[in-house]
Amino acid sequence: MGKFKFRKTDIDGMFVVEPKVFEDNRGYFMETYHENDFKKAGHDLTFVQDNQSKSSKGVLRGLHLQLKYPQGKLVRVIRGKVFDVGVDLRGDSSTYGKWHGEILSDENKKQLYIPPKFAHGFLVLSDEVEFLYKCTEFYHGEDECGIMWNDEDIAIDWPLDEIDEIILSEKDKKLKSFKQVNIKY
């Protein structure tokens, strides 16, 4: 087995990365990204910015995107567990408006790649989470947009069974519906 296992999702361009983990009595070691291995697998990506966040259980961040400067994101969790989601907003895509979600945790060490022209969000399922992501485009605050997390047309099946309260930022509370935003790249 190579250093990474790449698994396609039902949405073209969106994929799961499972790194090979070397464990022993001292702990573990893994590569989280290797440009040559990604290229060899057909994923020729250039990352320009890394971000990290810390959140508590019930925090839902998203669904976020940038309009003129869409970002691809390679996301992972270093502590805790989230349900991570990407929504296809490519107007010419057969999966336009469709979503894919994946449980990412410090235990499974999976990563999810969300291509540019997708909305992205995640829900924290553990008491606390530390979340990291690599971006293919710089952050432009003036270009930021989003779609409400519980939009009926997108109908994301968020795992809410063990969540007492959804915690949103003031900005995310004001996001509009999928139909109102009407984004087609």
Image: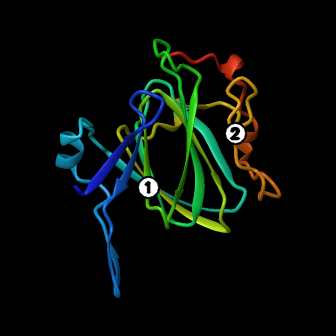
- Return the residue at label 2: 157
Q: Nearer the viewer, residue 128 or 22?
A: 22
Q: Residue at x 49, y 67 (%)?
A: 107
**Extreme residue in the top direction:** 92
Q: Nearer the viewer, residue 174 or 75?
A: 75
Quadrant where the N terminus sits is: bottom left
x and y percentages locating residue 144 in the rendered image: 55, 33
In the image, residue 115 above or below residue 107: above
- Amino acid marked by disc 2: Asp
Residue 110 is labelled as 1
Q: Residue at x 71, y 30 (%)?
A: 155
Query: Where on the picture, by quarter, is residue 21?
Result: bottom left
Sequence order check, earlier mark of 2 and 1: 1
x and y percentages locating residue 14 in the rendered image: 42, 35
In this picture the colour scheme is rainbow
Q: Residue at x 81, y 55 (%)?
A: 165
x and y percentages locating residue 102 in the rendered image: 54, 47
In the image, residue 109 above or below residue 133: below
Q: Residue at x 58, y 37 (%)?
A: 64
Q: Residues within 10 Å of mark 1 (few under 14, many from 20)?
A: some
